[in-house]
Amino acid sequence: MIPAPPDWSRELHTVGITGTNGKTSTTRWTAACLARVARPVAQTTTLGSYLDDEPFVTSRDLQGFMSTMRAALDRGGRFAAIELTSEALARGFARAWPCRVGVFTNLTHDHLDAHGSPEHYLASKAQLFVSLPRGGAAVLNASDEASELVASVVPEGVRIVRYAVHSRGESTGPVDLRAISVEPTWDGTSIALEGAGDLAGVPERIRVRAIGDIYAENALAALAAAIVSGVPAEAAARALAEAP
């Protein structure tokens, strides 16, 4: 049986990140942006649990997850950024812990040994977005064709924000945050941006320390998730530039 969320769970604004690739770096960068508003930020990834960048030693199960969230809240935290695997979502995690924002990175034909078919794999990831509350937001990779299938299950009253980087392919539908150019160097990756709508005020250029086009995708996902969570765009850009 899936446990009901604890009464205090909604006191943490939680951003859940899912997809085949890029979940961990997107989660870490989202947390870095959220920390510009309130600290500590609770993080859980496949690498472990953290309060900001400090490891939080706990069990790697639902009880350990709850301990991490509770510790952040007790220390004055207001935000959480969590990596969600398809296996956890298939078991009902999105009903056990409410996310305010859901982020979709991409979908490739991996993990079919656990899911049996691409359809079950995508349906598992879609559970995060089916469960988003009215007033929440779905941040989707417009250059990944699976995003429109995810968008079709987003509930009424949930805002959809799309980002795109040309290296993955042509985008589908309107794009709120687009990488105009991506310039990898030995020191990191510089990304020229174009925003639309509520994201029109993003900086013209952001930078991350990681190298490569794939990190541009993850940076845009984190930036969009942070902005819809209330982080000022300039502050989020500085956080991305300084994050490990």
Image: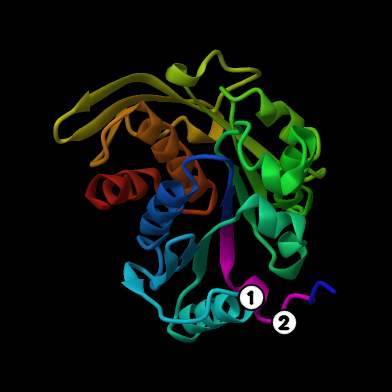
Q: Is residue 99 left or right of residue 226?
A: right
Q: Locate residue 208: give its quadrant.
A: top left
The answer to which of marks 2 and 1 sits earlier in the sequence is 2
Label 1, secondary structure: give it: helix
- Residue, disc 1: 62
Disc on res. 7: 2
Type of residue at label 1? Leu
Residue 12 picture location, percent across and down: 57, 71
Q: Locate residue 123: give its quadrant.
A: top right
Determine the residue located farthest toward the top in the rendered image: 170
Residue in the picture at 62% in, 20% down: 174
- Dot 1, crowdedness within 10 Å: few (<14), some or many (≥20)? few
User: Which residues lie in the magenta part?
Assistant: 4-15
Q: Answer yes or no: is residue 222 visible.
A: yes
Residue 74 picture location, percent across and down: 49, 86
Of the pair 158 and 166, the residue shown nearer to us: 166
Q: Is residue 112 left or right of residue 95?
A: left
Asked if residue 153 lies in the magenta stretch, the reply is no
Label 2, secondary structure: give it: loop
Q: What is the CA distance from the residue labelled 2 to the residue labelled 1? A: 16 Å
Determine the residue located farthest toward the bottom in the rendered image: 74
Disc on res. 196: none
Residue 113 picture location, percent across and down: 69, 44
Q: Is residue 82 above or below residue 184?
A: below
- Dot 2, crowdedness within 10 Å: few (<14), some or many (≥20)? few
Residue in the picture at 46% in, 75% down: 77
Q: Is residue 69 above or below residue 188?
A: below
